[in-house]
Amino acid sequence: MTWEFKKDRPIYAQLIEQIELNIISGLWGPGERLPSVRDLAAQAAVNPNTMQRALSELERDGLLYTVRTSGRFITEDGNMIQKLKDSLAMVEIREFFEKMSKLGFDRSQTIRMLENAARGEK
């Protein structure tokens, strides 16, 4: 997995987003054990404290849980994962409609273009 960071937002917030994407995309499955904080931090080339902060927030949100002496695991709650997936998708859709509006397209034009694109038309 490649960790990519932008300078416009805190690293821990970007870590949270990337971990969430790994979970909702199925890269890390429900109930799967995560690598240790140190291993994840090394992979991402970040300070372990920064990774710990991101993981703690995800745990507070219920997406991760800790089993003492065994490590951190992805929630097994499929509904929670699906809700997160739907929520992130809605954010992307809203941003897409905003960008299309800035290009001068109204909603119906944008939807028509999406339908054409889904059918493989130009």
Image: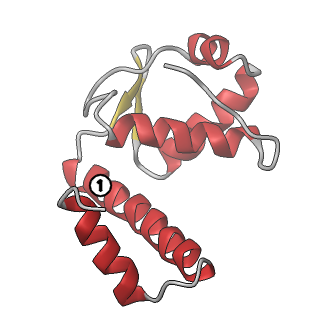
Quadrant location, the C terminus: bottom left
Q: Quadrant of residue 109?
A: bottom left
Count up the numbered dots. Answer: 1
Q: Where residue 61 appears, x then y in whole percent?
A: 47, 52
Along the viewing direction, whichever of 4 and 13 lies nearer the viewer: 4
Q: Mark 1 highlights which residue?
A: 80
Crowdedness near tag 1: few (<14), some (14–19) or many (≥20) residues, C-alpha within 10 Å:
some
Left or right: residue 2 versus residue 72 is right
| Whether residue 94 is situated above or below residue 84 in the rendered picture | below
Q: Where residue 45 appears, x then y in whole percent?
A: 71, 16
Q: Where residue 26 appears, x then y in whole percent?
A: 28, 33
Q: Quadrant of residue 34?
A: top left
The single residue placed furthest to the front in the displayed view is: 122
The structure residue drawn at horizontal position 73% and vertical position 31%, both measured from the top left corner, is 50
Left or right: residue 77 versus residue 42 is left
Secondary-structure class at tag 1? helix
Identify residue type, mark 1.
Answer: Met
Along the viewing direction, whichever of 112 and 80 lies nearer the viewer: 112
The structure residue drawn at horizontal position 64% and vertical position 20%, both measured from the top left corner, is 44
| Whether residue 101 is situated above or below residue 68 in the rendered picture | below
